[in-house]
Amino acid sequence: MNPKITVFMAAYNAANYISESIQSILDQTFENFELLIVNDGSTDKTVDVINNFKDPRIRLIHNDKNRGLTYTRNVVVNEAMGEYIAILDSDDVAIHNRLELQYNFFQEHPDFALCGGHGAVIDEVGTPVVDNRFTVPTDPDKIKMTLLFQNTYINSTVMYKTAVLRELNGYNDYAPAEDYELFIRISDKYPVGNLDSILVKYRIHGSNTSIVQSELGRTKVRSIKEKQLNKLQIKADKKLTDAFLSILEWNYSASNFTDYISLFTKLKAANRSLNKYPEIPFEMMLFNYWFEIIYAKKAKMNALSLLLNKNIFKWSYVSFRQLRKAFKLSIKGLGQLSN
């Protein structure tokens, strides 16, 4: 009898952490799973650590050499025996009922193709990082809208329908942002969700792929942003793409206000034409990003007039807090000008 869930773990020189990761799966309250581990040419004691476990639900596969993240992740497309595929990175720790919660979600929402959840941050030795957790949106419409700008999933919390992953031919070559690109493709075709629960302890350490490969990641994410704009029938020129990318990076110094106005105006028009997202929530999201940019760039004496830009602003979108902050920035700017 095939397992309901294939838990997938890619492993490369993961000896320091993989034992705890494996044990967190073996201790799950939901027991009808296989743990598929793909060793990507490790040169440390990773394989020895894995072989110390004798649970028959563990299936270890070896790449013929170090093939990299995208190739390794795609092994699961052909090898998974479960109806669902749950991802757990080899340095993270699953909460004890994570599989049960997600399996129940799919039974209650059979049209959904992807489900994730929140994460609690731990350090190298497993100590919780105080007041630090990764929270993700849980409203399905908000997840899809936010995916346009930022990743709304923690990779180690996600569970896919195996059939959908196969239909979409798995991961494309966007490592180390291959997960983000896949989430976007899934959300373009199917309902997607997040549970309002912590599903994983996410470990921060110096060898995190996203940290080690940050420059490569930026190049790949730029390609993703260009692809998103083109899909919305927006010409992805450098200024627009720079502004679009800066929102994901929370770094607004590289683009000017005119570029952001152009980006948001085009996104607004594209959505109204294509009807991709709910109109009012989407335009409110654009306005909230616009406010964050104005505040982050310290627009000062121009803050209020920028906030009220006719292409982005509606009175029903703005909060009193936003108006007050923009007004204070403008007053501060005028005061500095008079000095």
Image: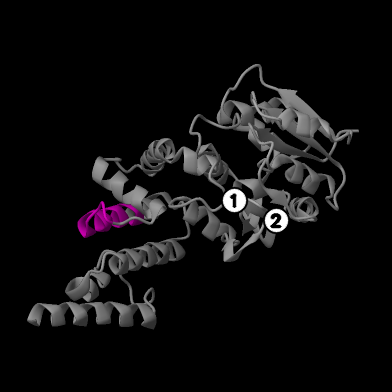
Is residue 147 left or right of 87 when viewed as pictured? left
Mark 2 residue crowding within 10 angstroms, few (<14) / some (14–19) / many (20+): many
Q: Residue placed at 81% from the left, 30% from the top?
A: 51
Q: Are marks 2 and 1 in contact (CB under 8 Å)?
A: yes
Residue 256 colored in magenta in the image: yes
Q: Nearer the viewer, residue 332 or 339?
A: 339
Q: Quadrant of residue 258?
A: bottom left
How many numbered badges does the structure rendering display?
2
Locate the C terminus by quadrant. Answer: bottom left
Please, what is the three-letter code of the amino acid marked with disc 2?
Answer: Leu
Find the residue positioned furthest to the left. Answer: 338
What type of secondary structure mainly makes up the magenta span?
A: helix
Residue 110, position in %: x, y?
Answer: 73, 49
Is residue 9 left or right of 168 when viewed as pictured? right
Q: Is residue 211 above or below residue 109?
A: above
Please, what is the three-letter code of the amino acid marked with disc 1?
Answer: Ile
Instruction: Determine whether the residue tagged by mark 1 lies in a helix, strand or loop.
Output: loop
Q: Is residue 42 above or below residue 134?
A: above
Locate the N terminus by quadrant. Answer: top right
Q: Is residue 190 above or below residue 170?
A: below
Q: Residue placed at 73% from the left, 32% from the top?
A: 37
Residue 94, position in %: x, y?
Answer: 73, 51
Q: Quadrant of residue 76?
A: top right
Residue 154, numbered circle: 1
Residues in magenta, as a range: 253-268
Residue 28, position in %: x, y?
Answer: 83, 50
Measured in 3D between alpha carbons, the distance from the residue under mark 2 to the one under mark 1, in whole angstroms, is 10 Å
Residue wearing tag 2: 199
Q: Is residue 133 above or below residue 175?
A: below
